[in-house]
Amino acid sequence: MEEKMKTYKKHPLSLVFKIITVVAITITVAVFLLIVGYVLIKGVPHLSPKLFEWKYTSENASMMTSIITTFEMVLISLIIAAPLGIFCAIYLVEYAKRGNKAVKLIRLTTETLSGIPSIIYGIFGNLFFVLALKWDYSIMAGAWTLSIMVLPLIIRSTEEALKSVDDSYREGSFGLGAGKLRTIFVIVLPSAISGILSGVILAIGRVVGETAALVFTSGTIAQLAGLFDSSSTLAVHMYTLSSEGLYMDEAAATGVVLMVSVLLLNFLASFIAKKFKKG
Amino acid sequence: MDNQINLVDTSDSGITNKHRLKNFMERFMQAVFFVCALMSIVAVIIICLFMFYNGIPAMKEIGFFKFLFGGTWLPTATKPSFGIAPMILGSIYVTAGALIIGVPIGLFTAIFMAKFCPKKLYKFLMPPINLLAGIPSIIYGFFGVIVLVPFVRNTFGGNGNSILTASILLGMMILPTVVGMSESALRAVPESYYEGAVALGATHERAVAKVIFPAAKSGIAAAVVLAIGRAIGETMAVILVAGNQPRFAGGILDGVRTLTSNIVMEMGYATGLHYDALIATGVVLFVFILIINILLNVITSKKKS
């Protein structure tokens, strides 16, 4: 320690540099604590039973319908995106040969998809699912839009998970006479399951927190809805509440539910991923 | 004897049948995997087609230059005028502001995490940074409304909904992107660089600042480009704090409307040419994003070679 102080005395710039980095990390962590803290402080006192009533009225500003819609949205978009994404990753890792041109194109387009901002997905969903396919504002249109949006996330995490399965597992399986398909489903996928799962959970987090892609695909009406009706998810509900400016307390309470569930999902994803790295 | 041979025969054809079925399944599933793999290509093509097909005609009708460089946006007037120059500038302002605030903090945070952080502390500092990336943008927006807007109004004046507010908020939002990517870039620099610098008498900090940091610059450049993409495409947080006036801003305390918020604010009720002009606004944003993607690709592929 003393020796360190001596070096710093000789090289004051080094000390300054280190202090700047410490300040930076403090700010970064403080930003996180500030956001979480403020939303909790503003929101928790307003969490009241009337916010969980089954029917939304302009008096109770209930979020119950939005919670149910969020579940529907998660379920449908995953039913679409999870198999597509996982199968795509299986092709990329298990079947594609090196230097395959199709693979290069798939990688490029997947990267492009993950760089497209959600509002563009929203416009596209509006043009394609709502208008061209005539689904109108509906949970289905929103779910399809989101499933394209989370596709790259699922592909990438599944790819990583499959790649980290040791080749000796595959060779052992082939050696015992199993075919490629059997090897993939019985040996490779089970060994990679936690990595795939953590990617899927991250995707759920994205769906739950998404707003811009949904405003013009599934709409902003707070109601219990079937798959081809318009209804707002929790995040969209929070946006309508806070943009009107009349329901800031209710928006804060909705924000607490939304933030806590998204943070828990992210936490769960990294927990599962860590477990998988060790095991 | 006859009986036995018969038995053998039937079981033989059973095996080939089974074999054939297995072979068929193998090929069938390979085809299924391949088709699924093509979905992201199909998605990109359809998205491009629909965006350009619906946006370009509006640009032509308004006039390409009038649309991009026109300074007045009066879509519902009796003589409507569709100029999105204020919005393009607005997006550029808030993105630049976000970079000015977010990149230095993010970079120094990354340096700390990669090179100065004690191992025991790392376990506690990393999760908050990662979770920042998971917080939905609407939560950031809400935080902006209840905390940043009053803060800017009271400290700097104006009504609080301004370029500055949006820049601070976006700066926060790009932190996890900048930190995550630059940290891995810093970690990827070979240890021998560091050892060489220290052996020549540099302090730990000097070695990091003068040797490791420059060596990681292409990874850091990629982080910044990605952050630009995030900031320029952000919608819900910006719309709540930026004020959204469709005019040229005079200073950083003026309100401003970005390309993204222009779309969200008006698409709900727009019809006809107005609706198409909003799609065209999306096309302009989309082109920005595609350029950023290409840039990112160039940087990362250079790094590999």
Image (cartoon, coloured by chain):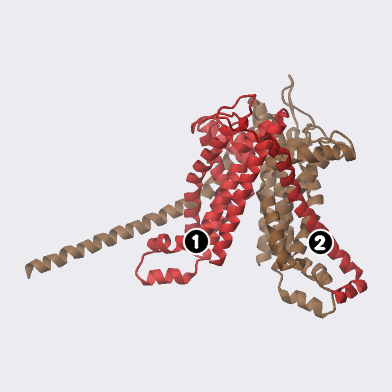
Chain colours: A red, B brown
Residue marked by disc 1: A192
Q: Earlier in the sequence, mark 2 or mark 1?
A: 2
The residue drawn where x is 68% and y is 29% is B266
Residue A176 visible in the displayed image: yes
Look at the numbered disc 1 and give the secondary structure of its residue: helix
Dot 1, crowdedness within 10 Å: few (<14), some or many (≥20)?
A: some
Callout 1 amino acid: Ala
Q: Amino acid at mark 2?
A: Thr
Q: Nearer the viewer, residue A236 or B49?
A: A236
* Residue annotated with mark 2: A21
Q: Position of residue B163 (x, y in %)?
A: 82, 40
- Which label number is shown at residue B293? none
Instruction: Tell whether A273 sits left or right of B141.
Output: left
Q: Tell me where residue A219 appears, x and y as whole percent.
A: 59, 31
The answer to whether residue B51 of the structure is visible from this angle is no
Q: Position of residue B29 (x, y in %)?
A: 39, 55
Q: Give the quadrant of the C terminus of chain B.
A: bottom right
**Mark-to-mark CA distance, 2 and 1:** 37 Å
Q: Residue at x 72, y 74 (%)?
A: B191
In the image, residue A235 above or below residue B208: above
